[in-house]
Image (cartoon, grey):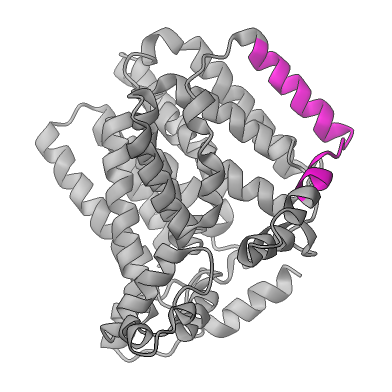
Amino acid sequence: MNTYLFIFLLLLFFAFLEISNVSGTKLRILHIVLVFVFVFVAGLRYETGVDWLAYQNYFDEVIPLNDAFTFNSFGNVFLTLDVGYSLLNSIVKMMGGDVQVVFFVISLASTFLLIRNLKYYSNHVLTGLLIYYPFFFFIFDMSGIRQGLAIQLVLFSVKYITQRNFFKFLFYILLATSIHWTAIVLLPLYIFANKKISIGYTAIIFLFSVVIFTFKIKWMGAILGDFVGQLNAFTMLSDKVTAYTTNEVFSQERGWDMFSVYNFLRIFLIVSAVHFFKDKISNSVPSFTIFYNFILFELICMFCFFEFFEVSERLRFYFAIAEVILLSNIIFVFKNHIIRIFALLLLASSVFLNAYPFLLQFPSTVAYHPYQNYFLHTLFDLNSDGYSRLQEHKASHE
């Protein structure tokens, strides 16, 4: 059975129920069902995805927290900048768990925050999940779980920008940073993320981004080179930045291709739609201005940070989550039920394009299919081909 396609169709059906004004009690039941589905699939995945072996190796290196206290060897707990994630691994290991427990805990936390964020910022949880699933689930719930949790923590902190509560904002950004160090660069958002950007400045940002991307105007390399030079005393951080900017894979440049054209057109259409329906959705979306700006920040990350693919990708996803919030609200602008259904189907078709290799089990996503579940493999003593599929994935992406 194609697990991933089944979930997508289930989400589409649930979103249809939501736009049909099903009662709040029934919607809450569906929320619980989807929490179970997300956590069961992502939290209990077994040797599935592209990062599981790296997480396994990291878990093996970390020592239990009680041993760190006994031998005063905390350096063997905090192996990276991601001290919160390191601590979680150490505690799980101290309690006799394995990396599967880490996967489950992070999936539970990420899914809980996702539902809570959608309820607060959108109030259209099921439609939001339909959008989230193709855009984020495979990348962050099934592989890059650390940044996936960091993204949800950053999203949770957005309301404190609007409320001008710096210390709560700072707390959640630092918490996100402890899970994935890249979140620290989002601290300046408190200063400028809530500034309104006019349609004229929006057009300038689009034009500026296209010019830089098309003519490959390089500016990041020199700045990051100087930055690394100032970080010699902070070995872990300088090593991370150096890896992202010099590694053969991480530092590859973007260029105009189908992926870039698709992303540019998608962002352009979203910004256009948000402007068109601005008066109808701005009052229903808390922190609307911030989420609108996030879409523009995503554009900048993709097209102005083209020199370093990994830097561009890591940063843009913190802002891309705004698409989930804004698009899920646009659907409900339409009061006519037939038009609303048509809009939902159009949206579902467009987001399907973002994940069709996963949903249709293309060879390029062999590390994800067939899906393997830890509970089922343990219960029925099944063999795993996860390692061989991971090697096949790596070979096909070299």
Kindly give the residue lying farthest to the right in the view shown.
215
Quadrant occupied by the N terminus? bottom left
- Residue 250 shown left or right of residue 358 in the figure: right
Based on the displayed image, in which of its 4 quarters is residue 376 positioned?
Answer: bottom left
Q: Position of residue 248 (x, y in %)?
A: 80, 64
- x 53%, y 30%: residue: 294
- Residue 150 shown left or right of residue 393 in the figure: left
| Residue 133 seen in the current view | no
- x 63%, y 60%: residue: 237
In the rendered image of this protein, does residue 8 appear above or below residue 27?
below
In the rendered image of this protein, does residue 80 appear above or below residue 289?
below
Which residue occupies the foreground of this view, 283 or 398?
Answer: 283
Based on the displayed image, in which of its 4 quarters is residue 178 positioned?
Answer: bottom left
Which residue occupies the foreground of this view, 357 or 1?
Answer: 357
- Residue 97 shown left or right of residue 149 in the figure: left
Q: Position of residue 293 (x, y in %)?
A: 54, 24
| Residue 376 seen in the current view | yes
Total tally of numbered discs in the picture: 0
Does the magenta portion include 212?
yes
Quadrant occupied by the C terminus? bottom right
In the rendered image of this protein, does residue 374 appear above or below residue 251?
below
Q: Position of residue 342 (x, y in %)?
A: 42, 25
Based on the displayed image, in which of its 4 quarters is residue 22 positioned?
Answer: top left
Q: Range of the magenta residues?
A: 201-224
Q: Position of residue 277 (x, y in %)?
A: 45, 12
Does the magenta portion include 397?
no
Which residue occupies the foreground of this view, 373 or 107?
Answer: 107
Q: Main secondary structure of the magenta part?
A: helix
- x 38%, y 56%: residue: 6
